[in-house]
Image: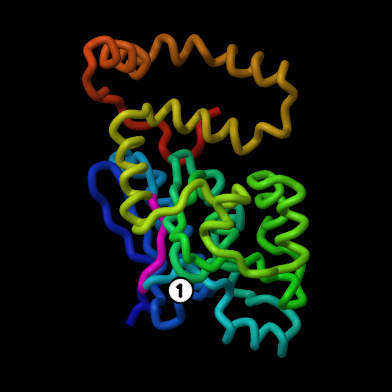
Amino acid sequence: MSDADPVLVTHDAGVAVLTLNRPERKNAWTVGMQGDYYGALAAAAGDPDVRAIVVTGAGGAFCPGADTRALTTYTETGTTNPLAEQIEQPEWFPSTIAKPMIAAIQGPCAGIGLVQALMCDIRVAAADARLSTAFARRGLPAMHGGEWLLERIAGAAVAHELLLTGRTFDGTEAQRLGVVHETAADPLARATQIARDMATDCSPASMAHIKQRLWTSRERSLEQTVVEVDAVLDGFLASEDFREGVTSFQERRSPQFRGLSHPTGPAQ
């Protein structure tokens, strides 16, 4: 039964594919799925053989949000599932992973499902995918950091409209609005192609540092950004990855970069 194994993990060519796996419920989110997904992310983050991560869903769906059975329970109890407090990682844990994450979106992607896609670095969607913030239509606030993520990624105007209306929009409109980066006939194949390119041709240490800076960039001024990057620049210039990056470019071949020295957290 998929509920006993709510997230499937496969590895190939430096890429870990994490598949939300409750197809009979269109991969609707549960506390058990969150614990399993965050655990799988932690394992991928700590695996030096994994250089990029793809997140997708089984059975032609990404994730339509919280399972309606759980929502019914919450209406009766007036509180969230206390088992969520047993999950070791915080809700924003995916944004702390030091490796690039690409979401492959098809079918429904709403509520916390959309939030998980927004916590990935790159999003590829099917043109007919169905996305929605959904929170306002369920009598809820913009949970799980959705307001911060959507405003940061797509801008204030888009965030206001999509969060306040809670309407459904397709993958084509999502690309136009900047919610996803591109559409593809086969989102998983395209996301995997992007991930393999990064795993093969990009330095894991460089990606980790760049990603960490991008996720916290609004906390810094331009001057502070330049000063802080210059402070660590010599370490990169003296690294094997930098020498290999230059040499492979000069020799017109694919680089052979090393894995992360500290793969369980973002570079500083």
Magenta span covers which residues? 54-59
Q: Looking at the picture, tell me which residue is in the foreground, 26 or 145.
A: 26
**Label 1 secondary element:** loop
Scheme of image coloration: rainbow
Q: Looking at the picture, tell me which residue is in the foreground, 96 or 60.
A: 60
Q: Which residue matches tag 1?
A: 27
Image quadrant where residue 161 sits: bottom right
Residue 95 image point, x, y percent: 56, 47
Residue 115 lies left or right of residue 44; in this view the side is: right
The outermost residue toward the bottom is: 76
Residue 141 appears in view: yes
Let me know if residue 186 is in the magenta part: no
Residue 68 lies left or right of residue 3; in this view the side is: right
Image quadrant where residue 185 sits: bottom left
Residue 110 image point, x, y percent: 58, 68
Quadrant where the image shows the N terminus = bottom left
Q: Residue at x 32, y 59 (%)?
A: 9
Q: Residue at x 32, y 39 (%)?
A: 48
Crowding at mark 1 (Cα within 10 Å: few <14, some 14-19, many 20+) = many
Label 1 is placed on what type of residue?
A: Asn
Q: Main secondary structure of the magenta part?
A: strand
Q: Residue at x 60, y 69 (%)?
A: 84
> Does 267 sit above or below residue 146?
above
> Does 129 sit above or below residue 217?
below
Q: Residue at x 59, y 13 (%)?
A: 231
Quadrant where the image shows the C terminus = top right
Residue 168 image point, x, y percent: 62, 69
Residue 220 image point, x, y percent: 72, 27
